[in-house]
Amino acid sequence: MNLLITTALSLTVFLSGSLYSQNDATNKDKQKTIKTDTTTSALSSTNEEEHIYTIVEDMPQFPGGKEALKAYFKENLVIPDAARDAKKQGTVYVTFVVDKSGKATDAKILSGIGYGCNEEAIRAVLAMPNWRPGKQKGRLVKVQYNLPVKFQSN
């Protein structure tokens, strides 16, 4: 009989402790969620000016469109001597930001071919005339843009 009472009491204490722990964990999770949501909304409103979009309702455009962009690179891209000597051809993939004024900034190589072509691609991208900037919800925004720059000998 004592064994039965001891077992019942032990089981009751064990289950009570387990239930209390579950409630405490659930409350902590709720508190964390509330804090995270509040923090996120506060951060997004303060960093709205600096946010760089990848896709927007109205994407940036080079003046004159895609054909004008091809013509720009044909006229302004200089094949480096090292690439010409090595008969190196290929495509350098550049990512850059079109800022709110349309200027190309923060150019970086995503995939390069070397022989001075990577540096030349960045130079040519940063020297481009201003683009028509991107818009999101009617506001001018910064937009990240990826561009293939082809190096080929004629």
Image (cartoon, helix red, strand yellow):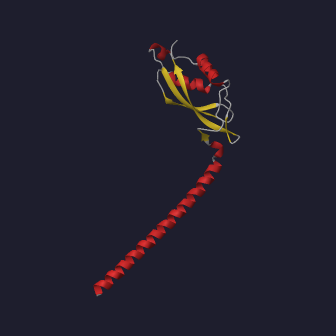
Judge by depth and name the residue closer to the eye, 81 or 148.
148
Question: In which quadrant is the N terminus drawn?
Answer: bottom left
Residue located farthest toward the right when viewing the structure as drawn: 138
The answer to whether residue 128 shows anywhere in this view is: no
Q: Is residue 99 left or right of residue 17?
A: right
Residue located farthest toward the bottom when viewing the structure as drawn: 1
Q: In percent of the image, x 42 and y 76: which residue is there?
A: 16
The answer to whether residue 55 shows anywhere in this view is: yes
Q: Residue 49, image x and y in percent?
A: 66, 44
Q: Residue 53, image x and y in percent?
A: 60, 40
Q: Residue 91, image x and y in percent?
A: 50, 23
Q: In percent of the image, x 59 and y 17: which residue is there?
A: 74
- Measured along the vertical axis of the image, is residue 86 above or below residue 143? above
Q: In percent of the image, x 67 and y 23: which residue is there?
A: 64
Q: How many marks?
A: 0
Q: In percent of the image, x 44 and y 70: which residue is there?
A: 21
Q: Is residue 96 left or right of residue 16?
A: right
Q: Residue 108, image x and y in percent?
A: 54, 31
Judge by depth and name the residue closer to the eye, 144 or 7.
7
- Measured along the vertical axis of the image, is residue 99 above or below residue 65? below
Q: Is residue 5 left or right of residue 140?
A: left
